[in-house]
Amino acid sequence: MSATAAVQRDPAPLNRAEHDRMANAIRALAMDAVEQAKSGHPGLPMGAADIATVLFTQFLKFDPADPYWPDRDRFILSAGHGSMLLYALLYLLGYEAMTIEQIKRFRHLGSNTPGHPENFETPGVETTTGPLGQGLGNAVGMAIAERHLAAQFGDIVDHHTYVLASDGDLMEGVSQEAIALAGHLRLNRLIVLFDDNGISIDGPLSLADSVDQVKRFEAAGWNATRIDGQDPQAIASAIANAKKSDRPSMIACKTTIGFGAPTKAGKASSHGSPFGADEIKGAREKLGWAAAPFEVPADILSWWRGAGARGREARKAWEQRLAAVPMDKRGEFARRHNGDLPLGFADAVRAFKEKLIAEPKDIATRVASENALGVLTAAVPEMVGGSADLTGSNNTRPKGMAAMSASDYAARFIHYGIREHGMAAAMNGMALHRGVIPYSGTFLVFSDYCRPSIRLAALAGERVIHVMTHDSIGLGEDGPTHQPVEHLAALRAIPNLLVLRPCDPVETLECWQIALEQKDGPSVLALTRQNLPQLRQEMATRNLCAAGAYEIAPSIAGQARVSIFATGSEVSIAVEAKKLLDAKGVLTRVISVPSFELFALSDAATRRAVIGNAAVNVGVEAAVRQGWDAIIGSDGVFVGMTGFGASAPYKDLYRHFGITPERVAEAALSKLGT
Ligand SMILES: Cc1ncc(C[n+]2csc(CCOP(=O)(O)OP(=O)(O)O)c2C)c(N)n1
Ligand SMILES: [Mg+2]
């Protein structure tokens, strides 16, 4: 039997000696790369090498020749610190981009082997992990996307999502949200391999944890089991069973961190630092690994490459299945997978904008968003909405949108439950899976509960859209616990995140258009609870919000002495203030600033023209000043919040905190010295 044929027996286990040598190749590469980089985490790759070898040689459906094949199984290394496990696998399996040179340059600038896995750097890496728990949350979203698309497209979508999760992943709170959601939706294509090594950085897990993880998963509706994670037969039969389950599965694989290291195995000291020459020498002896650093014996490499070639047939078979799908459906699948919006999208936006102009309405922007969603979700069938138990408040469920459940995966609205973090992490996974555009709903103040996932969406360049309503003291009586004041500034601080705060129904539609067209990054739509006047009453085919800032109310004659910049609900206050100032002969203009980020992207001349050269610049936003100086200058006047809000009807709050047209006009006049 040839070496290649040996690994093509599927899913029968390899013989033990072959298995051990293949797993040891991972261990050796991990030790060597960490040693050379003088930093990194050898413990996890060494402990989990047996799990990975069984999964990748016998079960995982993938093809290194086409890393983005839509129907591949997804493998998520949630414990991103174990990145060398993944890089070793990609190299051994024959992913072209993962050369031994890249492994040698682990953790160095410009390599595709960064400290923690980044999907945008490395073909074969499905998501960006490192912050523990996020990968597990992403995987739930991928498993949702898989079931959803399978329900819509049939057997051209038919794959599993596997996760390798560590103690840390399961200790993080977000894992509870993810697990509960997956169990509830009975995502049986989701299989979590728990690297149950009982060790974290501080030492044995017993220092800080005594949860029975198997019982915990079972309580959430999973199929869960415990095995010896160093025994390839046990691993293979547990995965085979999990694939038959009607629920998501968790396999607690008892492993030894740093397996093979003579003095550090089983200890926290193997977690996150190079072993040193002596320990590596001892490990090589113990594992029977005689090859030089970064060398993999030819027979072992060819077994691995054989395992890498295993999925080619499956991909070809899939291509045939796809070819048999009627052309329009196939085209639709490809469009969604590529992330291109439907051809009719721009027309749908324009037609709806004309309608908004023809029938102006003084409504809250959250209601304007619901109205826009009615049109947009009809035009863009890949939009999958949701809310973290605030559906009626966030207005994210347009009429007629059915709720997803274990018996209806084709439905497009997800009741995420009170799980903002799990929701945001799952949305990242949905976007990375491709084929869906997820949008969510919660209150803006709870963006804090989503923030770690929003940050990763921004880093990884994922199109997820967060609808965040109740975006200021304007929410009123619920009081300061629910009134965001620093959140706009905090979100604007995240690179590659668009923060969009529209002022009326037309801007709301434009902001939705921007968010949907933003293929390589996330957006937050900050929307009001309270009604606002419709300020935009003239048709503009162009998306005015796309400039980030534009003059919404020009000076009535000649040069303005005051420029008022405002966002969202404060734009109408600015327009009222302008009337007061104009009446006093102080010519004023108003600039709506729906997005600081987009404005910052405009060229300097455009920015200068929009900012203008009035004697006084005033900024108005019911939030803290941080970030505003870039627009109004450090000598600009800011009317907003300086601390937390209060509980009262919203009009009383605006008066109480001095965010009124009168106060804005006074502030401008006093700065003018008149
Ligand atoms: C949210 C988050 N907090 C802290 C860390 C830093 N950190 C990296 S690994 C780790 C825990 C290591 O334990 P475990 O998850 O069991 O991994 P193992 O040591 O077994 O490989 C911690 C605290 C992190 N990566 N993410
Ligand atoms: Mg551990």
Image (tube, grey):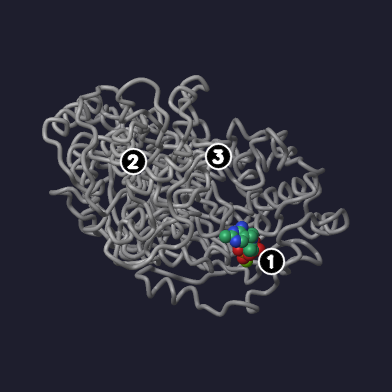
> Looking at the image, is mark 1 or mark 3 nearer the viewer?
3
Comparing 284 with 145, the one in front is 145
Q: Residue at x 65, y 44 (%)?
A: 88
Comparing 655 with 602, the one in front is 655
Report which residue position mark 2 lands on.
574
| Cβ of mark 1 under 8 A from ligand 1 | yes
Name the outermost residue toward the right: 278
- Considering the image in quadrants, where does the N terminus appear? top right
Q: Residue 635: image x %, image y %?
A: 55, 39
Q: Tell me the distance, in whole angstroms, between the alpha carbons under discs 1 and 3.
A: 49 Å
Query: Is residue 3 visible from the viewing direction of this image?
Result: no
Q: What's the amino acid at mark 2?
A: Ala
Q: Residue 341: image x %, image y %?
A: 30, 30
Q: In the shown orientation, is residue 105 left or right of residue 396? A: right
Q: Which mark is residue 201?
A: 1
- Considering the image in quadrants, where does the C terminus appear? top left
Q: Which mark is residue 635?
A: 3
Q: Tell me the distance, in whole angstroms, between the alpha carbons under discs 1 and 2.
A: 53 Å
Q: In the shown orientation, is residue 351 left or right of residue 482? A: left
